[in-house]
Amino acid sequence: MDWVERANDLLYDGESVEAQVRVDSGGVVVTSHRVLAFTPDREGANYRAVDRPNVDGVTTTASGEFQFLQQAVKAIVVGIALVVAGMTVSLDGLVSGISLDSGGGAASAVGLGQMMGLLQTMLTLMARLDDLLRIFGALALVFGVVVLGVYLWSRERLLVISVAGDDDIELTAPEDEDVLNRLEAALLPGDAPPGAASESAPDDDPLA
């Protein structure tokens, strides 16, 4: 059912339609008293009505899954830190000349051969620490770039009607920028009549 076209069925007595703007599968109807928003393509209620004095304006913005952006930034920062550390830290020269091979003898007799082998393995891993840092840093960077791509893909342009004291109304922004101008022209109050100032002022000065 196209409620944008049938907005007259929702009007109060004495209320009249001033503008109808189609937005995607829904739309906005501006009446003399209220703003009626129809959002069947958005989460939540399909219809919302706001008194016009509570409408602050209309803008366009972009939104996306913020948690994806957070994860992407963290992964990229960690990846850069690991790659930089892998490029600057080198333990090859420190451990290359160290050998803990007991070669049998007294160390083996007292059962220290296995411990020496374990320490030698640790030294070997330390010698390759810079390579490992670069590898894990590169993996973190790739992960961050992929998650950032997911965030950018999830972003969408929104047309937002600002509501004082309540949640704003969000609609999928149309490609036609003229829609925003039409809504602004319909929502913003018109200029005061030219004679309004003179009518509100006293005709005669009582002290004259």
Image (cartoon, rainbow, N blue to C red):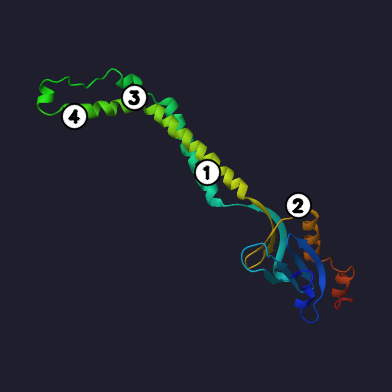
Seen in the image, is 3 located left or right of residue 125?
right
Q: Dots 3 and 1: beta carbons under 8 Å?
A: no
Other-residue count near label 3 (Cα within 10 Å), few / some / many at <14 / 14–19 / ≥20: some
Q: Residue furthest front?
A: 1
Other-residue count near label 4 (Cα within 10 Å), few / some / many at <14 / 14–19 / ≥20: few
Q: Which of the two discs, 3 and 1, labels the residue nearer the N terminus? A: 1
> Which label sits in the foreground, 4 or 2?
4
Q: Which of the two discs, 4 and 1, labels the residue nearer the N terminus? A: 1
Q: Which of the two discs, 2 and 3, labels the residue nearer the N terminus? A: 3
Query: Residue 114, which numbered label?
Result: 4
User: From mark 3 to mark 4, how far is it between C-alphas?
Assistant: 20 Å
The three-letter amino acid code for the residue at tag 2 is: Glu
User: From mark 2 to mark 3, how far is it between C-alphas?
Assistant: 57 Å
User: From mark 1 to mark 2, how far is it between C-alphas?
Assistant: 29 Å
SS state under label 2:
loop
> Which label sits in the foreground, 3 or 4?
4
Other-residue count near label 2 (Cα within 10 Å), few / some / many at <14 / 14–19 / ≥20: few
Q: Is residue 188 visible to us here? A: no
Seen in the image, is 150 located left or right of residue 125?
right
The three-letter amino acid code for the residue at tag 4 is: Gln
Q: Which residue is pictured at 75% across the width and 77% down the height?
A: 10
User: From mark 4 to mark 1, how far is it between C-alphas?
Assistant: 43 Å
Q: Is residue 208 above or below residue 128?
A: below
